Amino acid sequence: MSNLILMRHGQSIWNLQNRFTGGIDVPLTRKGILQAKKAGQELKKIGVHIDIVYSSKLSRSIETAKVAIKKFNSSKMIVNKIIRNEALNERDYGDLSGKYKDELIKIYGEKKVLEWRRSFTTKPPGGESLKDVLTRIRPFLLKKVFPLLKDGKNVLIVAHGNALRALRIATGEYKADNISNIHIPPCVPVIYNYIEKEKKLLVKDPKTNITSKFTYQIEEFGLKPSIIYRNLSVKKLIKIALGRNEGILTKSGAFSVTTGQYTGRSPEDRFIVDDNLTHKTVDWGKINKPFPSKKFDQIFEKMKKFEKAKELFVFDGFVGAEAKSRLPIRIITDHAWQSLFVKNMFIKPTSEELEYHEPKFTVLNINDFEARPELDGTRTSTFILINFKRKVVLIGGTRYGGENKKSIFGILNYILPDKNIMPMHCSANLGLNGDTALFFGLSGTGKTTLSADPKRMLIGDDEHGWSKTGIFNFEGGCYAKTINLNKKAEPQIWNAVRSGALLENVILNPKTMNPDYDDDSLTENTRVAYPLNFIPGAVIPSIGGHPKAIIFLTADAMGVLPPIAKLTTDGAMYHFMSGYTSKIAGTERGIIEPIATFSSCFGSVFMPRPAEVYAKMLGERILEHDTKVYLVNTGWSGGPYGIGKRFKIDYTRKMVTAILNDGLKNIKFEHNKIFNLDIPKSYPGIPSNILDPRKTWKNKKNYDKSAKNLSKMFVENFKKFKEVSQNIKKAGPKE
């Protein structure tokens, strides 16, 4: 396989003076010579042998080629054989040549000057358009360069900004209509692999994934790091993380970290910028708190200054497994392990997709940067700020990995309804006969555990979209709780803790370096992040059809809800909007024992729009596809938390299996008047008293009291929904 290397000359005197140079022969500055030397050193590091060197006929291009070659090839022969070709000369700027750009902007305006500089078809007075440059460069590439590449020769071309733009159109890398914004920095080699079979060139830098397009994007974003790593391999990320003492390796090869002060999400520190885009569309309140755009800009600028001359890690990829609706994202972090986290969690691009990647949203997560509340307008030093207009998320003051993915979910949950796609905080799996099932539930309800079923194929464990064609996963990985992880009960998650997986806040045995999943001394919110393909039989790409069954999971800490109940369509709407569960210890800062809570859509903290928007979409889809809906309680039985015991996972699995396999078809149900639910009287393999929660309590009066109390909580909570039909209101618990 042969290579083509393209490189722009170093800084010239007129570059320094900000003048139109074009075809005028202007020498390099001292800085330009140093840039050429550095480029030669970079080529030497890369280890590419060069057979043929082409340059324009202008001295700044010739000199750059000579200096660079001397740095990685001591042979005078190749230096003396630089082939000069006028087809590679810079665009002729005609009457603009030698003029200062700033002075021309004052006379003609910035827009007109930019048009002369970068337009594909517009010619400056007496000069060439970029189209003209392409006309002379394309034959050069096809007749001179391609035959050399075909013969296995490696070719270096040193030329000028517009000559290289034309070349990059001619190679097929860019189209004429998107080349104008491509910045070509001086002395940055762009390497192509020549694919003989396909007669095409592909940009490829396997060592860094850094391209001129990416460099331009980072510069435009305003970052100036000393080193930036992009889409490194798992192996390289772990190596760097170990070198930086960010974590340690377990016996199985998983990388283990602690997240410091914060071992869970910080929902109180999450804000959305209030502007003309979000002001009337976001459900403002305790969850979605407004933030001034000026304060956002202020923190953004501080973060950029904070990261100047430091190391950064970038992941470029996608969210959304459905090709037509996926969102290109960029996540920038200051820790290698965080880049490993997002690499595991999101959808990785192909090499070609990476080359053309243009993020629609960027997350800047600088763990070590802390806000000053009195100056920055944040609640604490920790912050998660979402700006839908600027398409930027800022995260600082916390190392908890989950903030990365949850911020992305917040973005999708806001933008997808406009595309008639319902975003859902749920897991999903697929039966062997192609039936799709959804599992809604907050953290700690068993959503991940129950969807990771060895007898079914996992689509995803946390967030999905429901489009016209069916279900698709947002992610490319899983983020599972590991507290009390048991190999027998959860074999898929257990076996996923291996090389490439990332453990968060899991205590390790210092002698064996094996995880102690029962140790909650640091937090109960212990986690593992791993790619979806770590689960045997996982559906990749992770899409499925319209769901046959939906299961609402709740971890009732009051111990009064039945372990399983069948819902009507109106009942499904009611419980979806209610989103009752108990927050489990450790999932959020400050939660040390279960707390009863209502979280609309089973994930209100991730839903920027009003609950009614999402509920309406769910109701329409349930009716259209005749989807069956059930409420499954994975919480406590025989009494509240501290007295009763949590339902056995084996029983819950049997009930879920019954739902998915139509095992409840011929089962008799009885109606619970308090909660307005239909409960099965019996099911094989499950003690009958378990199915009726009242029977599990020793003191029946205490059960009745607690049940009525929870029922009132349901009714009181639902009063906040004003635009809801009476049928839906009547489908819920009774006071």
Image (tube, rainbow, N blue to C red):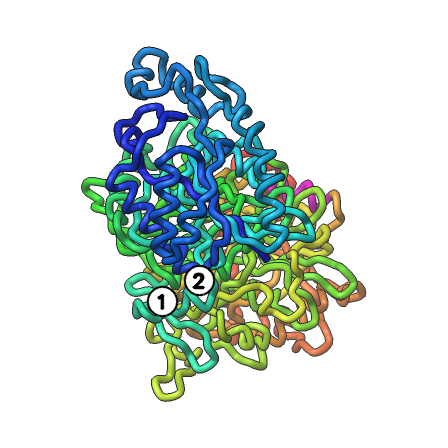
Q: Which mark is residue 241?
A: 1
Give the mark, 2 or 1, whose residue is nearer the N terminus: 1
Highlighted range, magenta: 615-623
* Cα–Cα gap, marks 2 and 1: 9 Å
Q: Residues within 10 Å of mark 2 (few under 14, many from 20)?
A: many
Dot 2: element: helix
Quick check: marks 2 and 1 in contact, CB under 8 Å?
Answer: yes
In front of the other: 665 or 182: 182
Judging by the rendered image, the residue that carries numbered circle 2 is 340
Dot 1: element: helix
Q: Amino acid at mark 2?
A: Leu
Query: In percent of the image, x 36 and y 66: which residue is there?
Result: 240
Q: Residues within 10 Å of mark 1 (few under 14, many from 20)?
A: many
- Residue 128 drawn at (x, y percent): 49, 21
Q: Which mark is residue 20?
A: none
Query: In percent of the image, x 73 and y 76: which residue is there?
Result: 684
User: Position of 54 compared to 692: left or right?
Assistant: left
